[in-house]
Image (cartoon, rainbow, N blue to C red):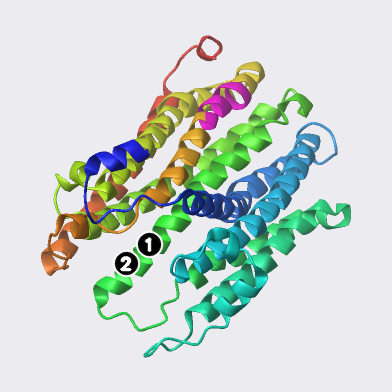
Amino acid sequence: MNSLLLAANTAGYTTPQLWRVLTKTGYFIGLSGAIGLTVTYATTVRPALRSAEKAAGSGTGPGADAAVLRSRSATSLAWAGVVLVVAGYFQLAARVARSGKGMPFGDALSPARIRDFLQAPAAKGAWIAQGTVYLLQNLVLLATAAALTALFVPAVRRHTDRVALAALPAALAVTLVAAVPTTAPADLDRWLDLAFDQTHIVSGTVWLGGLALLVALAGTRGRLGDGAGLLWADIWRRFSLVAMVCVGAVTVSGLWLSWKHVGAVSQLWTTGYGLALLVKVGLVLGLVTAGAVNQFWLMPRIARARRADDTASLRHLTLHHFPLVVWGEVVLGVAVLAVMPFIAGSARTEAGSAKAVSSGSLFAAGAALVVALAVSLYATAKASDALARRPAGVRAAA
């Protein structure tokens, strides 16, 4: 990665130090765990488990499988809390190090340094001190982590649904509070920058964190019954809808942020920012491709197996084939987070091009793009459904 950025040979780009790469990547991994796991549990896992338990009506079969998955979900959420608090501490120390000129990262880990940073007075013209914003963010982070890590306690695990639903808005607030501006945004573009940046972060962390949770849950297949494929078919179906929404949000917000920071196509390979962005886009396209495999190849086969009541094929598809593809997506997702610290500054600044200024025609084009994207995602879902209705030998496909 460093060699690619050095190849840009631009005066305005500085390769981030190792501690900056590790702390920022770790922070986004922590956010992916807290936001992605709680959102995916609330929107995908919990409804599927409740449906299975309602259908079972007893502690055997689907009911027992649901209990196993709920227990693993609780453990995963608890570990997400641990990762969040550790990553949050190092990210806060990184902010302290960047606030002091030439301050070594090791010195920034000192509680005294962190206290001084959080208590620093507001800058001239600011309605609130930046340190106060970060103090509030980290208080929310600690509360979120405490709620999640409490799931290690057996008595608390009996209330996993309530804990996860309570932690969800708090997890979202961790990133939203940090984005609160200390001065009023100067124009509409600045407001849109804030909104799209947070949309990009939230949708991306839901997508990646959700994939990680489902991979963790798939690891319980040795403890699940023969009929677990039906439950997992419901889980994959629900998450495919969540992932599709995330893809749309990441695409729209990413295009806005790219336009703000890249003034010409040539800047993608002539600036450090552009090269890092190219690497990220390539990795995201890999994620989208894997998602397309799920949507057009695996989901139709799962639907056909479910309709044919082919228990063996359904289990094989949902608990062997699908998790393998998702594991690949998780690896690509971690790589995306590792590239994020290198996307710093602006290709426009490096190239000396003009600042991006929005216009009515730009907003009209953006609205048309959003409509086209929504139509394409709807068409994707319909195409997947059409493939699922085609007759095929499900056992052979599995």
Decide which of 183, 36 is in the foreground and name it. 183
Question: Visible in this render: residue 238?
Answer: no
- Which residue is pictured at 20% across the width and 60% down the height? 349
Q: Quadrant of the C terminus?
A: top right
Which quarter of the picture shows residue 180?
bottom left
**Circle 2 sits on which residue?**
193
Q: Quadrant of the N terminus?
A: top left
Q: Secondary structure at mark 2?
A: helix
- Residue 15 marker: none
**Distance CA(mark 1)–CA(mark 2):** 6 Å
Residue placed farthest to the right in the image? 155
Residue at image location 22% in from the left, 54% down from the top: 11
- Amino acid bearing label 1: Asp
Q: Secondary structure at mark 1?
A: helix
The quarter of the displayed image where residue 106 is located: bottom right
Task: Please say whether residue 249 is one of the residues in the magenta stretch.
Answer: no
In the rendered image, residue 172, in percent from the top left (x then y), is placed at 55, 64
Who is closer to the viewer here, 360 or 378? 360
Magenta region includes residue 325 = yes
Task: Tell which of 389 and 21 is nearer to you.
Answer: 21
The percent coordinates of residue 119 (x first, y second) are 57, 83
- Above or below residue 194? Residue 123 is below
Residue in front for this viewpoint, 106 or 36: 106
Residue 289 coordinates in the image, percent (x, y): 37, 31
Q: Residues within 10 Å of mark 2 (few under 14, many from 20)?
A: some
Q: Is residue 32 visible?
A: yes
In the image, the segment drawn in magenta is 317-327
Q: Are the residues tagged 1 and 2 within 8 Å (C-beta)?
A: yes
Q: Which residue is mark 1?
A: 197
